[in-house]
Amino acid sequence: MTRVSWQATKLTVGELSERSGVPASALRFYERQGLIRSNRTAGNQRRYSRDTLRRVAFIRASQRVGIPLAMIREVLGLLPEERTPTREDWARVSQCWRDDLNTRIQQLEKLRDRLADCIGCGCLSIDVCALANPEDALGERGPGAHRLIGS
């Protein structure tokens, strides 16, 4: 394991991979998708600015909570390319997903709390469904887990 100097301003794909914990193949994919950018050396080798580490961490964290790459790309597009993003830049970007993340959190809490109970899917296969959803009344609303998604 080679140690990346904290003073390095440009990172190779291998150094970025090692420091971020993201495989080099994924970094090249992110670049093809327009999520991160590199400059090329005279020998056509990729060099990433050090702030790419934060972008990669943001991408990975966003993916972990289920945010699609297209949305991640859109939000990363709000960050400046000509300079390292500031704390204010990141705060502005984080506001873009605040409502969406709060909705996801509420849905996950409902799933956690109701998974062993009726979620209003219309299956009528659990004994409590007859109590929580008699005669599949929620089926009148159409397909889906109505108590879970709050429709």
Image (cartoon, rainbow, N blue to C red):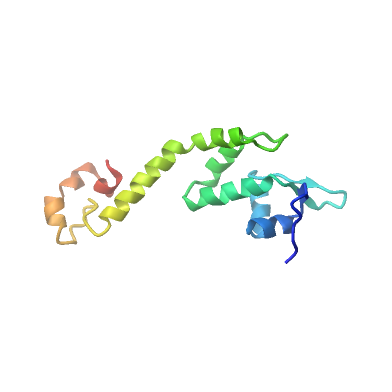
Check the picture and name the quadrant holding the N terminus: bottom right
Seen in the image, is 85 located left or right of residue 135?
Answer: right
Q: Residue at x 56, y 52 (%)?
A: 60
* Residue 62 seen by the camera: yes
Q: Residue furthest bottom?
A: 1
Check the picture and name the quadrant holding the C terminus: top left
* Residue 135 seen by the camera: no
| x, y percent for residue 111 | 31, 53
Seen in the image, is 115 located left or right of residue 22?
Answer: left
Between 11 and 41, the one lying in front of the other is: 11
| x, y percent for residue 63 | 52, 50
| x, y percent for residue 73 | 58, 41
Between 7 and 119, the one lying in front of the other is: 7
- Residue 83 figure quarter: top right
Seen in the image, is 44 located left or right of residue 81?
Answer: right
Q: Residue at x 30, y 49 (%)?
A: 110
Q: Residue at x 22, y 57 (%)?
A: 117
Q: Residue at x 83, y 51 (%)?
A: 44
Between 127 and 81, the one lying in front of the other is: 81
